[in-house]
Image (cartoon, rainbow, N blue to C red):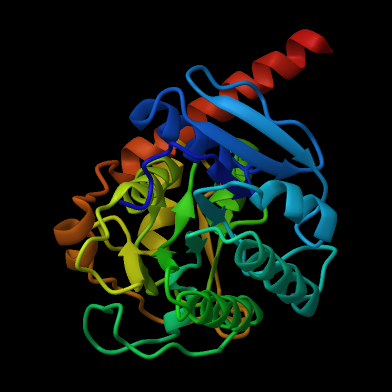
Amino acid sequence: MFGDFHRPVALAGAGGYLGEAVLGQIAARRPGATVRVLDVRPPAPVAGLDLEHVQGSPADPQALDLLMRGAGAAVHLGARTRRVHPRRSPDGEGVAMTAFVAAAAAQAVPHLLYCSSGEVYGEGARRALTEDDPVVAHSPLARLQIRSESLVREFAETEGRSATVLRPFGTYGAGQPTGSLIGRFLHDARLGLPLAVPGDGTQLRAFTYVDDVARGIVAALCRDDRGREPYTVYNLASPEIFSLRDLARQVLSVTGGRGGIVLRPRHLRPGQVAAQVPCIEKAAEELGFYATTLLTQGLSLCSLHADLAAERHSAVA
């Protein structure tokens, strides 16, 4: 079994909204586990977890050495937006991932888990995308993630090591950055602004709530690896498929926004594709993973989180 949690889990990327959800899911499934977090700031306490903080960046060799020392598994939550990072080039992100994998190998960490995304499929086939479908470097984020997946696969080629790549589709949730599509929609709807939908709005996507993605990550850490290949890939996605126009309508319905919808045919980003419909059978069969949060539920949770944050801000002001 990958995640017996008798040894610390090394985690990079815990500072974001996905990292917070992952820590919560580990606490729920493996109370008492030790999680060693690499970040510039200490993580908030999580009931049921023994959290250890390693201060530093993912490209800092000394911090990575401390992070990996004695760890039973290393988890990298990856880049979550198409912009990769507002102040860092894709090459810089790639260097950090190279250093992360090298540190895991140097410290003899037996298992590596990397959270990529469905972005790597590009336009894909005219059917549900399986983990065996080819990847396409059609955007800066896709290029970064494909390169990182290759590093993770090479890690697993050494005897005694194993690795898992997860490809979540359309991750969103409370605390997401406003630079993301759903984050921007929610922000604009609350201000009464029109929701600017790129293209003609017919692009098809799966949107997966952050808690479901986190459950998939922890399920992959806990899966029994006996008799399995040392390198495995899983899609993590909601079974619901929506067009971007329907997504905007859902946001307006949940928030009560009155700005309406505006189509922006010329606002398509480079590499944006018309349809990404994932096959989720492998994760269901091997991990017992099913995304259970409907889009309306997830958007309602995001809106509630924003309302509470606004109330706290008003109280402080």
Quadrant in which residue 141 is drawn: bottom right
**Residue under the image location 25 percent in, 57 percent down:** 240
Quarter of the picture containing the C terminus is top right
- For this view, does 191 lie left or right of residue 317? left
Give the x, y percent position of residue 310. Answer: 67, 22
In this orientation, which residue lies closer to the viewer: 116 or 315? Answer: 116
Compared with 75, 164 (above or below) is: below
In this orientation, which residue lies closer to the viewer: 293 or 44? Answer: 44
- For this view, does 29 lie left or right of residue 140? left
Q: Farthest top residue?
A: 315
- For this view, does 86 lie left or right of residue 4? right
In this orientation, which residue lies closer to the viewer: 42 or 204? Answer: 42
> Can residue 189 be seen in this snapshot?
no
In this orientation, which residue lies closer to the viewer: 84 or 149? Answer: 149
**Residue under the image location 25 percent in, 88 percent down:** 126
**Residue under the image location 61 percent in, 51 percent down:** 184
Quadrant in which residue 262 is drawn: bottom right
